[in-house]
Amino acid sequence: MLKAKRIAVVGATGMVGQTFLNLLQNDFYPDAEIVLLASKKSAGKIIEFRKKEHEVQDLSSFDFSSTDLALFSAGASVSSKYAPKAVSQGCVVVDNSSRFRYEDDIPLIVPEVNGHELNNFQIPNIIANPNCSTIQMLVALKPLHNAFQIKRIDITTLQAVSGTGKEATEELIGQLSSYNGNKVSVTSVYPKQIANNVLPHCGDFDENRYTEEENKILKETHKILDNKIEVTATCVRVPVLNGHSESLHLETKETISEEQAISVLQDAPGLKLHHGLEADDYPTATTDADGDNLVHVGRLRKDLWSNNRINLWIAADNLLKGAALNSLQIAELIFD
């Protein structure tokens, strides 16, 4: 395997960028030189990392030729402009934006699901990190699909504001701190207040009247898992700071029982199954997923009307497994 001696974090001042740094500080590539990159506006900021002060550098003038790996989390427009530049200078890029996800020659990877697709990966190149909601869903569904052949997925996501970014998190905290039972008059990030509310609106609405987030789940499931699976998604933004939750209803080709599903999931990689006898043995975004690397699965139960349907609940940290952690796990498939 290749050695990652120098790693660039692009978007180092953002929420995913900060999560990258937390992981690199404690768990990944302890001997690598880490370079912090961001926009010209953020250049010059000082971030303490590995007990040293690091100055954020201007991405627009950075030379990637001596960098082995670049972790991008600065949005699609930035990735579109600078990821190809990094590759042309000999750098491997793992990109968190949606910019390259649906291009045929760009692998879209969840290591537990389709990491084998990188076995013949040509260096240097771009690898796309999927959408956060797709990642946690497919970690849970891959073993079930292998065993029972999933035909249809109906999913409702309950997505934390950290998935939108730092400003959204600050908006929720601000609205909650001033909330007195009346409607909030000031909103800037979301079209309606998020405090004490839920918004069935994640991303812009597309021509088919589904939102961008809902269509991402469909397209990414088809590219990563199986393009024959029917997928219908409703994505909802909720007043939770961090950690996405999902309610899923699955229809399978093969008969599936609760006991069979438990047997398949209990040893699945990257996953923790909550299925004890206690009534409250189920995962939540705040108490289980936030700050944890695993995808948590619970509320597993057979459908009341069919032997080919089952229901489950999933929670995961959208900044960790949904973004930075998955990207670093991708990098581990290529670099020591």
Image (cartoon, helix red, strand yellow):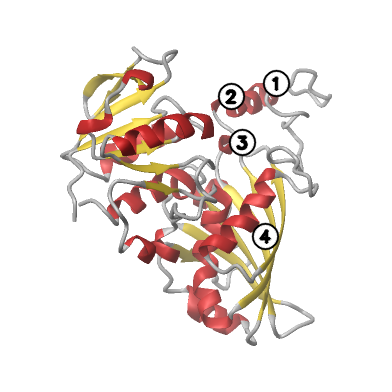
User: Disc 2 marks which residue?
Assistant: 167
Give the numbered dot on residue 20.
none
Tell me residue 185's x, y (percent).
Answer: 80, 18
Q: Taking 142 as reference, is 255 left or right?
A: right
Q: Marks 4 and 1: CB-CB under 8 Å?
A: no
Question: Answer yes or no: do the residues labelled 4 and 3 have beta carbons within 8 Å?
Answer: no
In terms of image quadrants, where is residue 186?
A: top right
User: For residue 187, what is the image quadrant?
Assistant: top right
- Residue 129 seen by the camera: yes
Q: Position of residue 160 (x, y in %)?
A: 61, 41
Q: CA distance from mark 4 to mark 2?
A: 27 Å
The Cα atoms of the two marked residues, 3 and 1, are separated by 13 Å
- Mark 1: amino acid: Ser
Residue labelled with disc 1: 188
Q: Are marks 1 and 2 in contact (CB under 8 Å)?
A: yes
The disc labelled 3 sits on which kind of residue? Answer: Val
Label 1 Cα neighbours within 10 Å, binned few <14 / some 14-19 / many ≥20:
few
For mark 4, does the 10 Å Cα neighbourhood hold few (<14), some (14 to 19), or many (20 or more) residues?
some
Q: Residue at x 51, y 78 (%)?
A: 146
Q: Secondary structure at mark 1?
A: loop
Q: Nearer the viewer, mark 3 or mark 1?
A: 1
Nearest to viewer (mark 4 / mark 1): 1
Which secondary structure, mark 4? strand
Measuring from the top left, give residue 208's x and y in whole percent: 79, 49
Quarter of the image for residue 122 reads: bottom left
Name the N-terminal-most of marks 3 and 1. Answer: 3
Q: Say which residue label 3 marks.
A: 161
**Helix, strand or loop status at disc 3:** helix
Labels 2 and 3 touching (C-beta < 8 A): no
Q: Mark on residue 247?
A: 4
